[in-house]
Image (cartoon, rainbow, N blue to C red):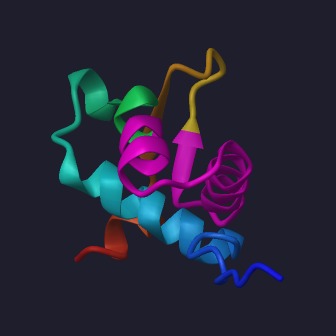
Amino acid sequence: MKLTTDRPFADPEKAARRLLEHSHAFEPFQDGRIYIEKLNGPFLFGDKGTPAEYSAGLDRAISRGWLVMHESGTYVKFTAAGADLFA
């Protein structure tokens, strides 16, 4: 029997907060934009999160009103509630 440990980002709330940490680490570009690759690269390859954890975390951050995704899906922006988490 193989022993396993719990995945650190299996909880969408933890994944969402980690994505917010990544987005806070980057200087927003034109008009407060944070390009989506600035979030998914560090989360998937640096933190070793899975695509399902990334998607669930991003959906949770958007549903909580911390981030707003552009209709094209290429970038997100902090909302006032999301920015207040780091104030």
Residue 44 drawn at (x, y percent)? 49, 44
Q: Position of residue 42 (x, y in %)?
A: 36, 45
Instruction: Name the main secondary structure of what is drawn in magenta.
Output: helix
Residue at the outermost right position: 1
| Quarter of the figure that contains the C terminus | bottom left
Outermost residue, left direction?
Answer: 27
Numbered marks: total: 0
> Which residue is painted at 71% across and 52% down in the image?
59
Q: 53 or 2: nearer the eye?
A: 2
* Residue 57 percent location from the top left of the image: 64, 58
- In this view, 50 is above or below 37: below
Vertical arrangement, residue 42 with respect to residue 80, above or below = above
Front position in the image: 51 or 33: 51
Task: Identify the residue at image location x=57%, y=26%.
Answer: 70
The verdict on residue 13 being magenta is no
Q: Is residue 59 left or right of residue 58?
A: right
Q: Is residue 1 above or below residue 81?
A: below
Answer with the quarter of the image where residue 5 lies: bottom right
Quarter of the image that includes the N terminus: bottom right
Q: With 55 as the anchor, is 15 left or right in this view? A: left
Region of the chain picked out in magenta, as a range? 40-68
| Residue 50 place in picture, x, y as percent | 64, 50
- From the viewer's perspective, tell me whether residue 28 is left or right of residue 3: left
Q: Tell me, yes or no, whether the highlighted magenta stretch contains residue 53.
A: yes
Query: Quadrant location of residue 86?
Result: bottom left
Q: Tell me the residue at 69%/46% (across/down).
A: 55
Q: Residue furthest top?
A: 72
